[in-house]
Amino acid sequence: MTMTTTEPSPAQARSRLLPIAVGVLGAVAAMALGRVIWPDPVGAPTPSAALLPFFIVISVVEAVSFGAGLAFAIVGLPALRRFAQPKGMTVAAYLSIVFMLVSWWPHDNLHRVLSHHDLAGLARIEYTFHVTSIAAAGIVGLFFLRAIRGGRA
């Protein structure tokens, strides 16, 4: 049995590489700019040498998630349109997925620079990121339930 493979056209190859390049560049930029945009407050506690690798790993994961969100922002909407859902639901699901991917980077950095005594600031962070993430997850869940059921939720 002979298998035939077709090479992607140059345009197809570029369209596949663009989100990858945006994702990688977004992740690298997030890692490089995190402490530039959100500098460590004077006198902030620093992790011990034993804990530092854990904080570095989570920072890398959040930066990669940020880059993935940027990549999804480029390719996600046309992909979600293939599910033939109402336009508003499709756009809401698209924005929800982008938000859930990109929001970890600013969320964690805001927690890092927030004073431990600023409970009002903590409440703003919690409502800005946690409540919106919960709503976004609900929107994505509803979108896919409707898509699975052929448009009925």
Image: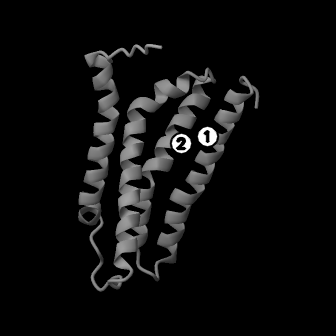
Q: Which residue is mark 2?
A: 96
Q: Is residue 14 visible?
A: yes
**Residue at mark 1:** 140
Q: Type of residue at label 2?
A: Ser
Name the residue located 63 percent from the left edge and 23 percent from the top edge.
86
Position in image of residue 147 (x %, y %): 67, 28
What residue sits 27% from the left and 70% below the top? 39
* Nearer the observer, 110 or 142: 142
- Judge whether residue 113 can be spotted in this image: no
Q: Are marks 2 and 1 in contact (CB under 8 Å)?
A: yes
* Residue 45, quarter of picture: bottom left
Residue 61 position in % (x across, y down): 40, 58
Q: Give the mark, 2 or 1, whose residue is nearer the N terminus.
A: 2
Give the camera-side residue of 2 and 52.
2
Q: For mark 2, does the 10 Å Cα neighbourhood hold few (<14), some (14 to 19), or many (20 or more) residues?
A: many
Looking at the rendered structure, the number of numbered marks drawn on it comes to 2
Question: Is 87 rendered above or below residue 27?
Answer: above
Relative image position of residue 38 (x, y in whole percent): 30, 66
In the rendered image, the vertical position of residue 72 relative to residue 101, given as above or below: above
Q: Secondary structure at mark 2?
A: helix
- Secondary structure at badge 1 equals helix
Dot 1: few (<14), some (14–19), or many (≥20) neighbours within 10 Å? some
